[in-house]
Image (cartoon, helix red, strand yellow):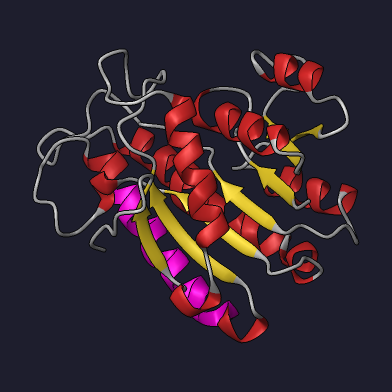
Amino acid sequence: MATILITGANRGIGLALADSFAGREDRVIATVRNPDRLEGLAAVMARFPHNVEVHRLEVTDRASIAALATRLARRPIDVLINNAGIYGPERQSSLDMDFDAWLEVLKVNTLAPLAVAQALLPNLRLGEHPKILTVSSGMGSMAFHKSDAVAYRSSKAAVNKAMQCLATDLKGEGIAVAVCHPGWVKTDMGGAHADISPEMSAAGLTRLVDRMSLSHSPEFLAWDGAAVPW
């Protein structure tokens, strides 16, 4: 039984991940922006009342991150999953960019995962074979030459590099780090015409967490286990 902390766990992929891990008797620490609006997470908690606990976390607020770390002080965490993320503004092309909104995308998708990881390192150091998985996107791969969603793509490319650096710095401590492409998922972000359900994505990501190892840190993998070019 492992302890898994998931950010953005109240809907979409995060919710499906909470359900996946709780369903196999792992302990899930689910973070949400507003604990008064649990949406689908309330149903997961009803099915697995002893396996899920909820904590408030605004990932762009350093005080909120610090408060979470204080509440969880001295508690081992085996896996941190940085899932919280946003797509960004309607205007985000290289020729027409909402720069203020782009900055917000970078705060949520790039800075927050590293800030959360840093704050929870004391917990991860107490975990058994600790791991950090950040939900990125194939849209952030430098190998794919497309020119839409520049704010989103650039934020994911940047978090990929940040996690690659974190993997190097933590390898000596035995903490494995990976980033993943969750697939094109039928969520509020992915839309109804996406390829796979949140449950299918979460099942694949759960398998990725299980196979993560220090010898393959860092990795960039798709939900189905395929390698994604950095």
State the residue in front, 181 or 146.
181
Q: In the figure, 100 relative to 213: above or below?
A: above
Is residue 119 toward the left or the right of residue 189 in the image?
A: right
Is residue 122 toward the left or the right of residue 228 in the image?
A: right
Q: Residue furthest front?
A: 24
Measured from the top left, where is residue 71 in percent x and y? 89, 47
* Most common SS among magenta residues: helix
Query: In which image quadrant can residue 169 be found?
Result: bottom right
Query: In which image quadrant can residue 194 be found?
Result: top left
Q: Quadrant of the C terminus?
A: bottom left
Residue shown at 35% from the left, 46% from the top: 224
Measured from the top left, where is residue 190 in percent x and y? 33, 24
Residue shown at 59% from the left, 42% from the top: 60
Q: How many marks?
A: 0
Is residue 51 toward the left or the right of residue 11 in the image?
A: right
State the residue in front, 146 or 222.
222
Residue shown at 43% from the left, 34% from the top: 201
Measured from the top left, where is residue 167 in percent x and y? 50, 74
Residue shown at 68% from the left, 49% from the top: 62
Measured from the top left, where is residue 27 in percent x and y? 79, 43
State the residue in front, 103 or 186.
186
Instruction: Please tell me whether residue 165 belongs to the stretch shown in magenta.
Output: yes
State the residue in front, 169 or 149.
169
Instruction: Please tell me whether residue 215 belongs to the stretch shown in magenta.
Output: no
Residue range highlighted in magenta: 154-170
Report if residue 114 is visible in the image: no
Q: In the figure, 53 relative to 46: above or below?
A: below
Report if residue 124 is visible in the image: yes
